[in-house]
Image (spheres, rainbow, N blue to C red):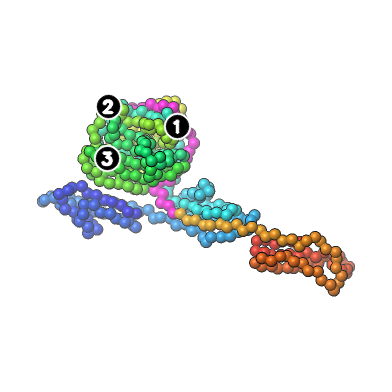
Amino acid sequence: MVGTITVTNSTATYAWSTGETTQTINEFASVSATYSVTVTDGNCTATDNVDVTVTPNPTVDLGNDVAICAGDSILLDAGSVHTNYLWNTVETSQSIYANASGLYSVTVGNGTPSNVGSSLSFNGSSTDINISNNSVTGSDGFVVSFDFYSSNLPVDDSGDPNYTIVDQGSGGQWGIQYAEENGTLRFQVKTGNWSSVEIPIVANTWYRIVAQYDKANNSIDFYKDGLFVDGMGVSGTLTSFSGYPGMRINREHNWNFTIDDFYISSDVSEASSLRNPGAPTTTSNTLVYYDFNEGSGNVSNDLSSNNLDGTITDPSWNTNVNTHYINNCTATDQITVTVNPLPTIDLGADTTLICAGTSETLDAGTGFDFLLMERWFYQSNSYQPPQLELYRYWNRCQWMYC
């Protein structure tokens, strides 16, 4: 894992536990570790540390490429030690049977399952949620989390559309949107200038998304399924904003997606618990929380003490339970399966019985890898010339009888 750790103080000197003396260090972490820094500014010093937890990557091996015969199948097994599987055939089992030529790949993960219950879908033409006509977060730090799914991500149209999930403020204060040119979700804040971080996503997959603006440490961070993906330092203060249009989900209502458990808190320290499986728990710092368990109607009830119930236009409610995986490190392997066609063998029509002591030539043709002929005699109890001769041929794919 490559991570960036930043300390913001332009006039200070720095002494990291790694021996580095720069304001920012980039660490390739292969094991969990604690990183500390001592900052000296004049006669004043301060020390802080951060724990970096590294989840080991799983391993998967489908074996060497393989050839089978037409009509046969082969079992492809990704191993039993993983918690989740996704084949390029869309199957999610540990093993699958392959009976057609092609490239088969599987991605395995070791994450913890988290269930998504009732959720709300946006139809891409009119659905939106008006949360507040004023700023919800103000200019203070905050953390936002939600479960997200889209079956039809917008394609790159070489323009600059706003495929917004949530945003706040006329002209922009902060927001999370889909950047179709990169295939990523983008979390951006305006602290004088715009700053943004991104995480890659694919269609037909549930994600737990957590984004935080840490005002005290002048940083923004973006997490996917419990894992840190992108972060950066920012300067200045979040743009002050109040008044309409406030905060809205899918403001442009121009694309399809589904969300669940939408939560915002003013306490950025809650980010660590929000990255874990399960629904959020409200605290005194919760700004809004919608669990979308209503299942019907045009109102999403705010479970925080602020009572900022969301007004929904053209809702599409879902009650299916879906599972995705938190802290899910993955690995992928692939195998090519080749299906060889069966050969054609024709020994011709049955022949008249020949006399003892004479022979008949039977020709199975050329081009076979291996040919074995056996002659079986079927006789009655009393001795008499053979009644039937059965020849059996082996050509790598199967026995052929005549």
> Is 345 situated above or below 202?
below
Percent position (x, y) of residue 377? 81, 67
Q: Distance of mark 1 from mark 2, alpha carbons?
A: 27 Å
Residue at image point 17% right, 50% down: 46
Residue type indicated by callout 2: Gly
> Is 3 situated above or below 170?
below
Which mark identifies residue 123?
A: 1
Q: Which residue is mark 3?
A: 194
- Mark toward the start of the polypeptide (1 vs 2): 1
Q: Nearer the viewer, residue 368 or 283?
A: 368
Q: Residue furthest bottom?
A: 357
Which mark identifies residue 379?
A: none
Q: Distance of mark 3 from mark 1, alpha carbons?
A: 29 Å
Percent position (x, y) of residue 400? 71, 61
Residue 317 in magenta stretch: yes
Q: Nearer the viewer, residue 231 or 356?
A: 356
Residue type indicated by callout 1: Asn
Q: Which residue is mark 2?
A: 243
Residue 2 in magenta stretch: no
Query: Disc 3, disc 1: CB below 8 Å?
Result: no
Q: Nearer the viewer, residue 11 or 282?
A: 11
Occupied quadrant, residue 280:
top left
In the image, is 386 to the left or to the right of 188?
right
- The residue tagged with tag 2: helix, strand or loop? loop
**Where does the magenta region start and end?**
303-331
Percent position (x, y) of residue 187? 32, 41
Q: Residues within 10 Å of mark 1 (few under 14, many from 20)?
A: some
Q: Nearer the viewer, residue 310 or 313?
A: 313
